[in-house]
Image (cartoon, helix red, strand yellow):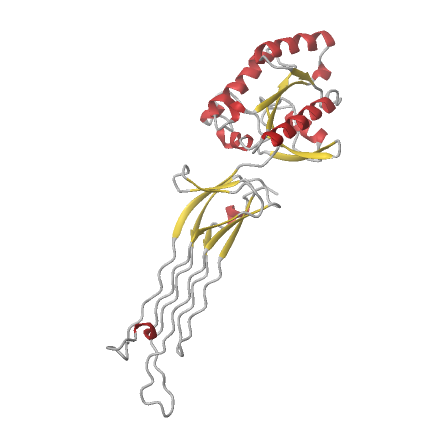
Amino acid sequence: MKFLDEAKIFIKSGDGGAGAVSFRREKFIEFGGPDGGNGGRGGDVVFEAVGNLNTLIDFRYSQHFKAQKGNHGMGEKRSGASGEPLIIRVPVGTQVLAEDKETVLADFIEEGEKLVLLKGGDGGFGNEHFKSSTNRSPRKSTPGWPGEELWVWLRLKLIADVGLVGLPNAGKSTFLSIVSRAKPKIADYPFTTLVPNLGVVYVHDKEFVVADVPGLIEGAHEGVGLGTRFLGHVERCKAILHLVDGTQENVGEAYKTVRHELDRYGQGLEEKTEIIALNKCDALTPELIAEKKKQLEKASKKKVYTLSAISRDGVTTILDALLKQIHNNEDASP
């Protein structure tokens, strides 16, 4: 399934049905009087968050959504049927934005959440409604009210417990493929990963979700490279696993580049718990590992784990640390 995290769609609720002009015409009833029914109400546009989706790709091929119109009123005081609501199903983590791409109209973070975004138009009145003591045979009816219409942007921010960040080619996809059943594309060149990948990690009879976010580069918070398009997928994570390529000459500078982009992007990323791991240690000597680890600890002022996704050295220790942090955040949440 192809990944798409942003789409623009047109939505319109149903128009109300028109009221009817009708009179009773029955044998032996000389003055039947008006009996035109009211029109039915138009259908609402309803958004619903579902748990079995993780892409907006369906909205690339279908971009116009219109709810059903209400039926017209009929004689014998019969009101028209209301239009069926239009239910638009989106992945958990989807935001609905106004056309300016800034105003948030809805934010779906839990499965099963529903929201009526546009209400259907009311039905018009039939002539029976206008009958009075001074007007016994009104020939007046009203049309239904038009539905509402709107262009909106859908933006998906993946719901994951852990976000993998790092410079391009830091080994994030390899790590994800080792700890989960996800099968991201892996190669020895930058920007192999062009879309976020999700993987479910099982450890100690518990599970959590990891999101592999495409590599960040300097200026990403301003849209450079893959830019802010994918930084948003880290916003909802409980913790960040920052992988640093141990084969780089200056691991401290590599760390600071990504850290700067997270801090400048904001949206709470700068406050998230960060676990740092020096990756690709299988390609380093023990002396070089110690030296690189010391450089990274000096640059980050935090504890640094050593890791080799290829040989799996240090993987269990990292997973234990992540699981502990996730549970700490869950216990601290209100």
- Residue drawn at x 65%, y 23% is 171
- Residue drawn at x 38%, y 54% is 148
- Residue 283 lies left or right of residue 270; in this view the side is right
Quarter of the image where the C terminus is located: top right
* Coordinates of residue 257 in the picture (x, y in percent): 53, 17
Nearest the camera: 176 or 267? 267
Q: Is residue 88 above or below residue 334?
A: below
* Coordinates of residue 177 in the picture (x, y in percent): 70, 31
- Residue 172 lies left or right of residue 135; in this view the side is right
Can the viewer see residue 40? yes
Image label count: 0
- Residue drawn at x 70%, y 19% is 307
Can the viewer see residue 183? no
Q: Is residue 168 above or below residue 17?
A: above
Nearest the camera: 221 or 162? 162
When asked about the image quadrant of residue 164, the answer is top right
* Coordinates of residue 58 in the picture (x, y in percent): 54, 47
Nearest the camera: 257 or 300? 300
Q: Is residue 172 above or below residue 35?
A: above
For this orientation, the residue located farthest to the bottom is 28
* Coordinates of residue 267 in the picture (x, y in percent): 48, 28
Quarter of the image where the N terminus is located: top right
